Amino acid sequence: DVTDDIEVDSSNLSYTDADYKIMANQMYVAMKGAGTDTPAIERVCKKLNNVDDWNALVKAFGVKSVSNWFYKFSGTLYDWLQDELSAREIRKLNEEILNNIGVTL
Protein backbone atom coordinates (compact mmCIF):
# COMPACT_ATOMS: atom_id res chain seq x y z
CA ASP A 1 0.00 0.00 0.00
CA VAL A 2 1.51 3.32 -1.08
CA THR A 3 0.15 5.02 2.04
CA ASP A 4 2.37 2.90 4.33
CA ASP A 5 5.27 5.35 3.87
CA ILE A 6 3.26 8.36 5.06
CA GLU A 7 4.65 9.60 8.37
CA VAL A 8 2.33 10.54 11.22
CA ASP A 9 3.41 12.05 14.53
CA SER A 10 0.98 10.27 16.84
CA SER A 11 1.52 12.88 19.56
CA ASN A 12 -0.24 15.43 17.30
CA LEU A 13 -3.30 13.31 16.52
CA SER A 14 -6.71 14.63 17.52
CA TYR A 15 -8.58 11.31 17.20
CA THR A 16 -8.26 7.55 17.62
CA ASP A 17 -7.41 5.13 14.81
CA ALA A 18 -11.06 4.04 14.84
CA ASP A 19 -12.16 7.65 14.33
CA TYR A 20 -9.87 8.04 11.30
CA LYS A 21 -11.27 4.81 9.83
CA ILE A 22 -14.82 6.14 10.29
CA MET A 23 -13.86 9.44 8.64
CA ALA A 24 -12.12 7.59 5.80
CA ASN A 25 -15.27 5.55 5.22
CA GLN A 26 -17.36 8.74 5.22
CA MET A 27 -15.06 10.14 2.53
CA TYR A 28 -15.34 6.96 0.45
CA VAL A 29 -19.15 6.90 0.71
CA ALA A 30 -19.23 10.59 -0.29
CA MET A 31 -17.28 9.85 -3.48
CA LYS A 32 -18.27 6.37 -4.67
CA GLY A 33 -21.09 5.84 -7.11
CA ALA A 34 -22.96 8.49 -9.03
CA GLY A 35 -22.44 12.03 -7.84
CA THR A 36 -20.18 13.38 -5.15
CA ASP A 37 -21.34 14.56 -1.72
CA THR A 38 -19.06 17.59 -1.50
CA PRO A 39 -20.61 18.88 1.77
CA ALA A 40 -19.81 15.51 3.42
CA ILE A 41 -16.18 15.80 2.25
CA GLU A 42 -15.98 19.33 3.65
CA ARG A 43 -17.48 18.21 6.99
CA VAL A 44 -14.80 15.56 7.41
CA CYS A 45 -11.98 17.91 6.39
CA LYS A 46 -13.19 20.55 8.87
CA LYS A 47 -12.62 18.05 11.70
CA LEU A 48 -8.89 17.91 10.93
CA ASN A 49 -6.70 20.11 13.10
CA ASN A 50 -3.23 19.58 11.61
CA VAL A 51 -1.23 17.82 8.90
CA ASP A 52 -0.86 14.70 11.05
CA ASP A 53 -4.66 14.39 11.22
CA TRP A 54 -4.71 14.62 7.41
CA ASN A 55 -1.95 12.03 7.05
CA ALA A 56 -3.72 9.68 9.48
CA LEU A 57 -6.91 10.06 7.42
CA VAL A 58 -5.02 9.32 4.18
CA LYS A 59 -3.47 6.21 5.79
CA ALA A 60 -6.86 5.06 7.11
CA PHE A 61 -8.36 5.51 3.62
CA GLY A 62 -5.56 3.47 2.06
CA VAL A 63 -6.10 2.56 -1.59
CA LYS A 64 -9.70 2.05 -2.62
CA SER A 65 -10.99 0.68 -5.91
CA VAL A 66 -14.30 0.88 -7.69
CA SER A 67 -15.19 -1.04 -10.81
CA ASN A 68 -18.27 -1.61 -12.90
CA TRP A 69 -18.95 -2.34 -16.54
CA PHE A 70 -18.07 1.15 -17.74
CA TYR A 71 -15.64 2.55 -15.17
CA LYS A 72 -12.65 1.39 -13.16
CA PHE A 73 -10.68 3.52 -10.70
CA SER A 74 -8.21 2.87 -7.90
CA GLY A 75 -6.31 5.32 -5.75
CA THR A 76 -5.50 7.00 -2.47
CA LEU A 77 -7.69 9.64 -0.83
CA TYR A 78 -5.70 12.31 -2.67
CA ASP A 79 -6.35 10.51 -6.01
CA TRP A 80 -10.06 10.13 -5.26
CA LEU A 81 -10.46 13.80 -4.37
CA GLN A 82 -8.59 14.86 -7.53
CA ASP A 83 -10.83 12.58 -9.60
CA GLU A 84 -14.15 13.47 -7.96
CA LEU A 85 -13.90 17.21 -7.38
CA SER A 86 -13.84 19.97 -9.98
CA ALA A 87 -10.94 22.43 -10.07
CA ARG A 88 -13.23 24.99 -8.43
CA GLU A 89 -14.20 22.59 -5.63
CA ILE A 90 -10.54 21.68 -5.03
CA ARG A 91 -9.57 25.36 -4.88
CA LYS A 92 -12.40 26.04 -2.39
CA LEU A 93 -11.44 23.04 -0.22
CA ASN A 94 -7.81 24.16 -0.23
CA GLU A 95 -8.49 27.84 0.48
CA GLU A 96 -11.24 27.43 3.07
CA ILE A 97 -10.08 24.33 4.96
CA LEU A 98 -6.97 22.38 4.02
CA ASN A 99 -4.44 25.21 3.63
CA ASN A 100 -5.19 26.15 7.26
CA ILE A 101 -3.66 22.84 8.39
CA GLY A 102 -0.74 22.85 5.95
CA VAL A 103 -2.30 20.64 3.26
CA THR A 104 -2.85 21.36 -0.43
CA LEU A 105 -4.54 19.06 -2.93
Image (tube, rainbow, N blue to C red):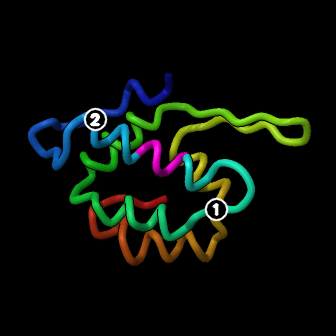
Q: Residue at x 49, y 51 (%)?
A: 27
Residue 27: give its label.
none
Q: Name the quadrant containing residue 67.
A: top right
| For residue 2, side relative to residue 67 (left or right) | left
Marked residue nearer the N-terminal end (2 or 1): 2
Q: Main secondary structure of the magenta part?
A: helix
* Residue in the image at 54% along x and 46% along y: 28
Amino acid under disc 2:
Ala
x, y percent for residue 33: 71, 50
Q: Which labelled disc corresponds to residue 18?
A: 2
Please tell me which residue is depicted at 32% across the width and 66% down the height of the picture. Answer: 46
Q: Nearer the viewer, residue 60 or 96?
A: 60
Look at the image and give the residue range highlighted in magenta.
24-28
List the residue tagged with mark 1.
Answer: 36
For mark 1, does the 10 Å Cα neighbourhood hold few (<14), some (14 to 19), or many (20 or more) residues? Answer: some
Residue 8 falls left or right of residue 98: left
Q: Determine if the magenta segment contains residue 78.
A: no
